[in-house]
């Protein structure tokens, strides 16, 4: 053989070796496309699952009704005659109500609070125990009507 054909043969052999080395290694445990019945069942169950969470309803708990005692109320009516107002710059103002002097902000015997509203014409504001408000001037009779709980 000639040296030229020896060079070609060795070049060819080197190329075959290099090509074989550049291929990825083939794993010995190649999986087949066929699966066992258990694997097929697992694949099918995973295939048909949804990403939505399963809604589970909470158990219904029955609660016994509790009787709530509703407080009974009665209508209370009071009349307050405003006889006069004394305004003070250095202390509490005074209001004459039903012939008695009440200091500004104080309560009447039934729990209503009496206040002086200052302005061009001073006025009296009476706040009933339930929060209702009534106003009047000197000489007025204020009728206060509110709901009060019945005790007992």
Image (cartoon, rainbow, N blue to C red):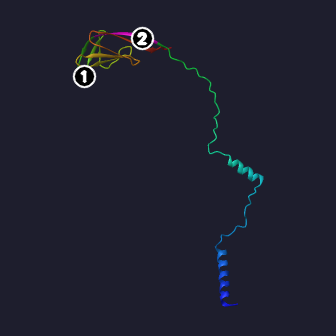
Q: Which residues are magenta?
A: 74-82
Asked if the magenta segment contains residue 136, the reply would be no
Residue farthest to the bottom, as pictured: 2
x and y, in percent, of residue 113 in the image: 35, 18
Say the numbered circle drawn on residue 76: 2
Query: Is most of the magenta stretch helix, strand or loop?
Result: strand
Is 140 left or right of 39, judged from the image as shown?
Answer: left
- Residue visible at 67% across and 87% down? 5
Say the numbered circle drawn on residue 91: 1
Q: Decide which of tag 2 and tag 1 comes sooner along the chain.
A: 2
In-front residue for pair 45/103: 45
x and y, in percent, of residue 122 in the image: 25, 17
**Quarter the N terminus occupies:** bottom right
Residue farthest to the right, as pictured: 37
x and y, in percent, of residue 100 in the image: 30, 11
Secondary structure under tag 1 reads loop
């Amino acid at each position: 053989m000639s040296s030229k054909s020896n060079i070609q043969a060795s070049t060819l052999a080197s190329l075959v070796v290099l090509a074989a080395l550049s291929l990825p290694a083939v794993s010995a445990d190649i999986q087949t496309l066929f699966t066992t019945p258990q694997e097929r069942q697992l694949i099918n169950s995973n295939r048909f699952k949804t990403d939505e969470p399963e809604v589970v309803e909470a158990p219904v708990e029955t609660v016994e009704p509790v009787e709530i005692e509703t407080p009974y109320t009665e209508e209370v009516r009071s009349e307050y005659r405003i006889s006069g107002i004394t305004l003070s710059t250095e202390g509490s103002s005074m209001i004459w109500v039903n012939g008695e002097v009440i200091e500004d902000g104080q309560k009447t015997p039934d729990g209503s609070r009496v206040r002086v509203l200052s302005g061009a014409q001073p006025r009296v504001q009476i706040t009933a125990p339930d929060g209702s408000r009534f106003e009047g001037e000197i000489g007025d009779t204020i009728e206060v009507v509110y709901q009060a709980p019945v005790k007992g």
